[in-house]
Image: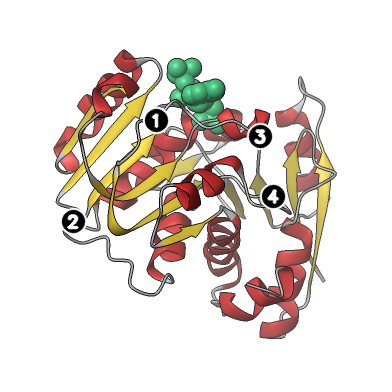
Amino acid sequence: MDHYAVIGNPIGHSKSPQIHSLFARQTGQDLVYEAILAPPDDFAGTVRRLVAQGYRGFSITVPFKHEAFDLADRLSERARRAGAVNTLKVEPEGLYGDNTDGVGLVNALRAVPGATLAGARILLLGAGGAVRGVLAPLLAEHPESLHIANRTAEKAAALARDFADLGPVSGGGLEGLAGRHFDLVINGTAAGLNDQVPDLPDGLLTPGGGCCDMMYGDTPTAFVRWGQSQGAGWTRDGLGMLVEQAAEAFALWRDCRPDTGPVMTALRPDS
Ligand code: ATR
């Protein structure tokens, strides 16, 4: 039986084992998927030991996505652009590093009835690793514009410069948002870890516009609650992105694509 694992620190609350077990059962794949805690200073050693034991692939989560990028022998173009790896595949010639976070977000958004990315004015909040990871796949959907707004304006501007070759992307501070309007607002800041939202002006959303958080929780996240308070046409938290990025990793490892709908329903029966 083939072995896979998610590696992170902390790892106790990861939903990935449940998600991949549901994928395996649904597709009839014979595999074991577990959660492994790596010491903060021994990610590479942990991966090497698991590879020696015969593990076939890994999901990588906080705080190891950059180390996984450095450890990979070969990288996908989207991982190179993201500067981070969330999926490793053990191949005969070494470790292949991919990043499925961005395509996971795009696929989760595509599943929202009425949401369209092509031609949309998108606002992306934050300018850290989470946002860098999704920029290329979002720009590939041909939005009318993609604006990155961050508490520290210069980080957003620098990120926009890095991706300017891929589409109409701009960047600036949160204070520059007053009076602007967007069809879709995506939260990629870490403010939700403290149940907060970035400091945003009212009236950002166009009528029927959507809000998507990259974080998820058992109760509505602070950003989802903000969207509801702003009269959003729809809101989603990051659970769909989590399931979709996992499906993309599963497809890379097993050459077989699971159906994510039933897995979303199993994880959140009332959605
Ligand atoms: P990640 O890898 O999860 O993206 P990160 O690289 O530390 O984490 O980035 C965190 C992001 O959340 C940053 O954009 C940060 O803004 P700054 O660049 O100004 O630090 C943003 N952030 C964190 N807490 C925030 C808060 N309370 N309000 C607004 N933005 C916040």
The residue carrying mark 4 has its beta carbon less than 8 Å from ligand 1: no
Q: Which residue is mark 4?
A: 217
The residue carrying mark 1 has its beta carbon less than 8 Å from ligand 1: no
Can you tell which of label 2 and label 3 is closer to the viewer? 2
- Badge 1 or badge 2: first in the primary sequence: 2
Residue type, mark 1 in image: Leu
**Callout 3: helix, strand or loop?**
loop
Kindly report the distance in space between the C-alpha atoms of the residues bearing marks 4 and 2. Answer: 30 Å
Q: Which residue is mark 1?
A: 200
Q: Nearer the viewer, residue 185 or 25?
A: 185
Disc 1 crowd rating (10 Å Cα; few below 14, some 14-19, many 20+) is: some
Disc 3 crowd rating (10 Å Cα; few below 14, some 14-19, many 20+) is: few
Residue type, mark 3 in image: Val
Q: Relative to 61, does residue 109 appear above or below in the rendering?
A: below
Q: Are marks 4 and 2 in contact (CB under 8 Å)?
A: no
Q: Relative to 249, does residue 102 appear above or below in the rendering?
A: above
Give percent across and percent down for residue 53.
Answer: 83, 50
On screen, residue 171 versus residue 152, left or right, reads: left
Q: Which residue is mark 2?
A: 142
